[in-house]
Amino acid sequence: MNILIIGGGAGGSSCAARLRRLDNSADIIILEKTKETSIASCGLPYYIGNVIADRGKMQVASAELFDKLFDIQIKTGCEVTAVNPEKKTVTTAQGEEYSYDKLVIASGAKPFVPPVNGLEKLPYFVVKHLSDADEIKEFIKNNAIKDAVVVGGGFIGVEVAENLNHLGIKTSLVELADQILMPLDNDMVRPVQKKMKDNGIELYLADGLKEITEDGLILNSGKTVKAGMIVLAIGVRPDTDFLKQSGIKLTERGSILTNEFMQTNFDDIYACGDNVAVKDFVSNQTVMIALAGPANRQGRLIADHIAGKPYPYTATQGTGIVKVFDLTAAFTGNNEKQLQRANIPYEKMVITAASHAGYYPDAQELTLKVLYNKEGKILGAQAVGTQGVDKRIDVIATVMRLNGTTKDLRDAELCYAPPYSSAKDPVNIMGMAIENVRDGLVDPYFGTDFKDMFVLDVRPPEMYQAEHIDGAVNIPGAQVRKRLNELPKDKTIMVHCVKGYTSYVVARILMQNGFKNVLSYAGGWSYYKKQK
């Protein structure tokens, strides 16, 4: 069997290696338009910042390895310009023609460069290939760059900004939206933005690139930003222009449409990676989600299908994680904005918890948020903190994948020892908190507007005296039972504590003593402060 693979990135390379393991007799050729194969693209910002100093570590697998270990030929510098499904051939920029029995299109995505006035007046770069990172490093070295601007607040933009900062370069980040890291909700992204500002990165949010001069950028707001170089991290577009005359079905944005086996509308042509449209695991809508994990799995799935071991691709959750200085932010599923756009009803819960047992040294605070529906189906989750963020989101992502519910979060049996967690892990606490709401035991509150509410602060007096919500009344939690007569029964009482547990306990006391309108502030003072 003659198998052609267009693209030597995550999806294409995974597909090729899996195919060889399943079929030693197949003729497998990878056509890669760049000079690079199997590059650790997600590590490029850290290579730019010299966190990864060894360039050799950026190559996951070389063309020589593919040749000698897998007997797979990789032709680099070989750009495919056309696909002819009727003839079962592809044509390259050099005028060569290759025939296939099976074709896998893993051409990936390409960075978007906006049509901005004056773009040629300042050196600008994108971050897609290892050669791009090499150019950035060389330019910084040779020009003693002091100021840089990153345009775009997604994964790459945020990571590049941090790494330029790590090199001692005064760095600014411009983002058209009103926040960075769009997979996070606004309440969860605030501490991440604060962390960037605290480390000297200037953020220009809800602002865009209007014009470029020899000295820097002019933004839509009229603000000017000094820069010796620009990194464009605005986003990517499917690299599928060469398919427009092929008859292969594409979305309006150019993503390839496939079935559950990653087959296009031509049975012998498959597609995987950042160039394909996928089903969103939560909304079931057709979306483009550019992530390395799904690309690898799709490539493997295609290889199995070609080898006669079919199984379906079961949508993309959009699980991701990002490091921002000493903070970690992670997420899975949909956020509030996505659910609202898809008209999916949802509830939410936020907790503030410790990364491990509080009595063991160096426990760190983390904020965990889960979105769910009235039946307890988990729709999404987000977490921000300095420790233990990844494992909590990984657990919830797995429960989601297995169609678990919030009850499964409550009941999950997770490993515990004081250095690693608590007997009730934050995942368990989240499940318990949600089930308390679903059982009608408490009504949570998340806002910052307390108009017409009686705010009951049940923290210790010294915490209240140091800082409190205007108009709040302080009655420490342990005193509430004896001071119920001080509380109004004709107003909504909003109870808050440090992290959310004591306020829940007090809310239950009030509700069982005839108080009808009681709210417990989810996440406590720790979460509230992050909203200000």
Image: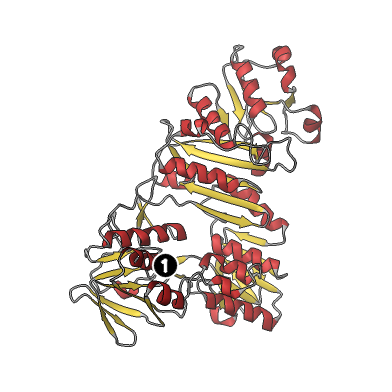
Measured from the top left, where is residue 111 in percent x and y? Answer: 47, 70
Mark 1 residue element: strand
What percent of the width, then of the height, locates residue 358?
A: 71, 36
Residue at the extreme bottom of the image, as rendered: 94
Q: Residue furthest left?
A: 86
**Which residue is pictured at 57% across the width and 58% down the height?**
206
287 or 118, which is in the foreground? 287
Q: Quadrant of residue 250?
A: bottom left
Residue 135 higher or lower than 323, as above or below: below
Number of numbered labels in the structure image = 1
Q: Is residue 527 or residue 215 the one in the foreground? A: 527
Viewport quadrant of the N terminus? bottom left
Q: Quadrant of the C terminus?
A: top right
Residue 383 picture location, percent across and down:
58, 45
Q: Horizontally, is 99 left or right of 504 in the view?
A: left
- The answer to whether residue 495 is left or right of residue 443 is right
Res 14 quadrant in image = bottom left
Which quarter of the picture shows residue 58? bottom right
Q: Identify which amino acid the numbered label 1 is placed on.
A: Arg
> Please, is residue 69 above or below residue 475 in the view?
below
Q: Is residue 137 visible?
A: yes
Q: Position of residue 159 (x, y in %)?
A: 60, 63
Residue shown at 33% from the left, 72% from the top: 5
What colour scheme was applied to this rendering of the protein?
secondary structure
Please indicate, yes or no, whether residue 291 appears anywhere in the rendered image.
Answer: no
Label 1 sits on residue: 237
Q: Badge 1: few (under 14), some or many (20 or more) residues near its Cα, within 10 Å? A: some
